[in-house]
Image: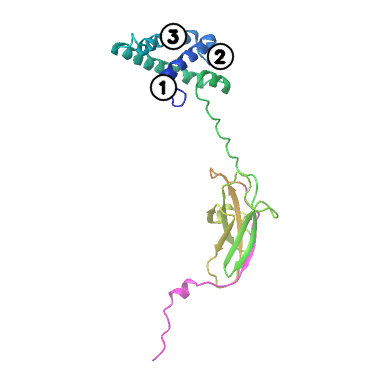
Amino acid sequence: MAKGYMPPKQAEQVAWSQNFSTIISSSPATFGLTQPQADAFAGINTTLQQAYLRGTTEGTRTKISVAEKNTALKNMKVAARDLVSIIQGQAISAAQKIQLGITVRKDKPTPKPVPSQKPFVKVKKVDGRTVTIELRQDKSKRGKPANVAGATVFTASGDSAPESATDWKFVSNTTRTTLEIPFPPSATGDTVWITAFWNNAKDESGPAAKPVSVNLPAGGVLPSEANEAPVRRAA
C-alpha cells in the first residue's frame, strides 16, 4: 500500500474507506474506474463497516468478531491500493485527490536547461607562469547565470587560438568562478589561450567563451634542468 494516504488508526481507516467508496461510486469514470470496480469496493466497504461495528461494540466484541474486523480492514486496504494506483494515473485535480483522501503527488521538477550563454573570461592576475582568471556572465556582470552549476576550462598555446576542439587541453571542472591556472615551464616566452563553457547540474555544456590570450614570460623548472646533477666544488 502506498504510504502517506491511509490514516494510522483503525477508526480513521474505516472512515476513510466509507468516504472513498461514496465518492468513487457516485462517478467512477471521473476517476478512471469502471462501475464494477466501484461496486466491488462498495461491497468490501460494507463488510468492513459491519465487521468494525461488531468488533468494537461492547456485547458483540469477541475474539472472532475482532479477527473478522481485522480481516475486513486488510481486505479493504488491498482493494484500495489497486484502485488508488489507477486513480493516480488519471488527469484529475489535486482537489479531487484531497477529497478522496489520497496522496497529492508533487509535480516533477522542471528540467534545468542547457546553458545558452557563453562565459566571459577575465584575466585577473599573471604571476610568472600562473594565470588567475575570473569567469563572468558578461564583461560587467559577475557570477554564474541561473541554472549553471559550474564550468569547464581549457587552455592552448600558440600564435592563435585553435579552431579544432581537439587541440584544446582540458584544465579543470570547477564550481567556482575564480581559478588559478599554472602553465608548464618554457625556455622562451609564449602565448597561451584560455576558454571555458558553463555546465548545468546534469553536466550538459553550453557554448564556449571567446578565447583570451596571455603572453607569458620564460620560466619555471625545465625537465632538463631538474635532471642535471648538482655541480660539486673542489675542496
Badges 2 and 3: C-beta atoms under 8 Å apart?
no
Secondary structure of the residue carrying tag 2 is helix
Residue drawn where x is 59% and y is 64% of the image: 131
Task: Name the quadrant containing residue 189.
Answer: bottom right
CA distance for labels 2 and 3? 17 Å
Q: Can residue 195 be seen in this view?
A: yes
CA distance for labels 2 and 1? 29 Å
Work out whether mark 2 precedes mark 1 in sequence or the reverse, and give the earlier one.
1
Q: Badge 3: few (under 14), some or many (20 or more) residues near its Cα, within 10 Å?
A: few
Q: Position of residue 97 (x, y in %)?
A: 54, 21
Camera-nearest label, 3 or 1? 1
Q: Position of residue 6 (x, y in %)?
A: 44, 22
Instruction: Check the image and tell me how it is coloured.
Output: rainbow
In this view, the residue in front, 143 or 154, is 143
* 210 drawn magenta: yes
Secondary structure of the residue carrying tag 1 is loop
| Residue type highlighted by circle 1 | Lys
* 211 drawn magenta: yes
Work out whether mark 2 precedes mark 3 in sequence or the reverse, and give the earlier one.
2
Q: Position of residue 112 (x, y in %)?
A: 58, 39
Q: Mark 1 points at which residue?
A: 9
| Residue type highlighted by circle 2 | Thr
| Residue type highlighted by circle 3 | Ala
Q: Mark 2 points at which residue?
A: 30
- In this view, the residue farthest toward the left is 63
Q: Name the residue under label 3.
A: 40
Work out whether mark 3 precedes mark 1 in sequence or the reverse, and give the earlier one.
1
Whether 105 is drawn above or below 68: the answer is: below
